[in-house]
Image (cartoon, rainbow, N blue to C red):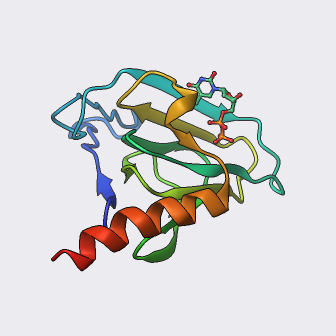
Amino acid sequence: MYNVSEFSFRKIGSNSKENIGFLTPIEENKDIPFEIKRVYYIYGVSGDAVRGGHSHKALHQVLICVNGSVDIKIKNYFGEKTYHLDDPSKGLYIGPDNWREMSNFSEGSVLLVLASEKYNEEDYTRDYDSFIQYIDRKYGNLLSKK
Ligand code: TYD
């Protein structure tokens, strides 16, 4: 799905000790494709709650479910797909122009988000009809020029 991708981070364990768990490092412009200007995390969400319901015009993000699991539904010009995040060593990159909804948060889940820009409400599209119009205009024009 264009402008969205799943990837795996390094998962460093130990060859000699079995019980010390894992360490996953994330460096900007190395493990993820942008500079990190902001970090936030979402937690304490009920299993029946839905968050998100917006897109961004310029923001790049990587979502990592560092505890538990969550579903991320993405809608963009090319279709719709739901990603299930349940592994702290995996990330979901979401570029601009993707409508997202987060749901099915497991009890105790923590969703970590690394973002390419500081918080800016102007970058959000929070109305679904406006999102569809914006996407049709932008991508319809782009694709028809090819
Ligand atoms: P929002 O992005 O709508 O959350 P979600 O998509 O998870 O439902 O943000 C919820 C509120 O938090 C909103 O009032 C804006 C505020 N907020 C910040 O102040 N800083 C931030 O970095 C973020 C992501 C949100």
Q: Residue at x 50, y 73 (%)?
A: 81
Q: What percent of the width, then of the height, locates residue 132?
A: 55, 66
Q: Please tell me which residue lies in front, 107 or 127.
A: 127
Q: Is residue 64 visible?
A: yes
Q: What percent of the width, then of the height, locates residue 127?
A: 67, 53
Q: Please tell me which residue lies in front, 120 or 138.
A: 138
Q: What percent of the width, then of the height, locates residue 63?
A: 46, 44
Left or right of 46? Residue 105 is left
Quarter holding the C terminus is bottom left
Q: Tell me where residue 100 sits by quadrant.
A: bottom right
**Is 32 rendered above or below residue 120?**
below
Q: What percent of the width, then of the height, locates residue 102?
A: 64, 54
Left or right of 40? Residue 5 is left
User: How many marks are shown on the rendered structure?
Assistant: 0
**Is 44 rendered above or below residue 76?**
above
Q: Please tell me which residue lies in front, 64 or 17.
A: 64
Left or right of 43? Residue 77 is left
Quarter of image, ligand 1 = top right
Q: Residue at x 40, y 41 (%)?
A: 61
Q: Please tell me which residue lies in front, 135 or 52.
A: 135
**Is 77 rendered above or below residue 99?**
below
Q: Residue at x 41, y 36 (%)?
A: 19
**Is 73 rendered above or below residue 116?**
below
Q: Is residue 70 visible?
A: no
Quarter holding the N terminus is bottom left
Q: Residue at x 51, y 25 (%)?
A: 120
